[in-house]
Image (spheres, grey):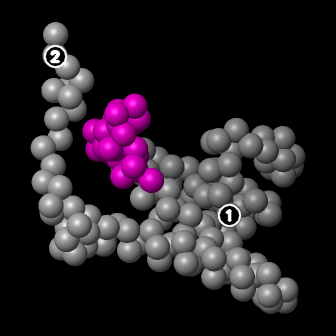
Amino acid sequence: MASMADDDDLDLNYENLITKEYMASKFVNFQNVIIVFANISNIRSVVIELIDTNSDSGDFVKQMGVSNLILLLSFNKYLYMSKDYGIFPKTLVKASRTVLEGLIGVLPLIVGLMFMAKVIFFESYLFKSLSDTGFTFFFTTNGDFFGGVFWATEKF
């Protein structure tokens, strides 16, 4: 029966663990710099929003959204290295090509339906522009606001 030390044999060179080169190679990489930048961006946008009450909150929401998206994407690194959760990012990576091909295949149909809905329901406030039409399609596809869309288009 093998001992626990045999299973977890890491073969580390402990003399190199304290050198500057080793520390720089392990802790200063591109992904860590991006994480620090996203955190600073989050802190900056919150401080600006708290100090300047007359500012446009749309910029605040956009900056927070981009910063949080970057942090969420960087979280994949930690999941990938974990034994318990490593299957999740590996599945996403393997399935992303199939999902992307499916989205590209359905995209012309969605754009065609958006143009058709814009032409038919042009008087409704939900279909005034192509971006409004796309947003309406997005939230009805996700199961939101069916009644409101029906009531906004029932006179047509």
Question: How many other residues sit within 10 Å of disc 2, few (<14), some (14-19) or many (≥20)?
Answer: few
- For residue 132, which numbered disc appears in the image? 1
Q: Residue at x 45, y 68 (%)?
A: 35
Question: The disc labelled 1 sits on which kind of residue?
Answer: Asp
Where the N terminus falls, by quadrant? top left
Whether 87 is among the magenta residues is: yes
Question: The disc labelled 2 sits on which kind of residue?
Answer: Ala
- Displayed quadrant of residue 16: bottom left
Q: Secondary structure at mark 2?
A: loop
- Displayed quadrant of residue 74: bottom left
In the image, residue 105 lies at what x, y percent? Answer: 36, 45
Question: How many other residues sit within 10 Å of disc 1, few (<14), some (14-19) or many (≥20)?
Answer: some
Q: Is 79 on the left-hand or right-hand side of 38?
A: left
Region of the chain picked out in magenta, as a range: 75-103
Is any atom of residue 42 visible in this view? yes
* Near-viewer residue (63 or 121): 63
Q: Is 13 on the left-hand or right-hand side of 101?
A: left
* Near-viewer residue (18 or 105): 18
- For residue 103, which numbered disc appears in the image? none
* Near-viewer residue (148 or 100): 100
In the image, residue 111 lies at what x, y percent? Answer: 50, 55
Magenta segment main secondary structure: helix
Q: Residue at x 15, y 49 (%)?
A: 12
Q: Residue at x 68, y 72 (%)?
A: 61
Q: Secondary structure at mark 1?
A: helix
- For residue 2, which numbered disc appears in the image? 2
In the image, residue 119 lies at what x, y percent? Answer: 65, 60
Q: Residue at x 56, y 50 (%)?
A: 113
Vertical relation: 62 (above or below) 87? below
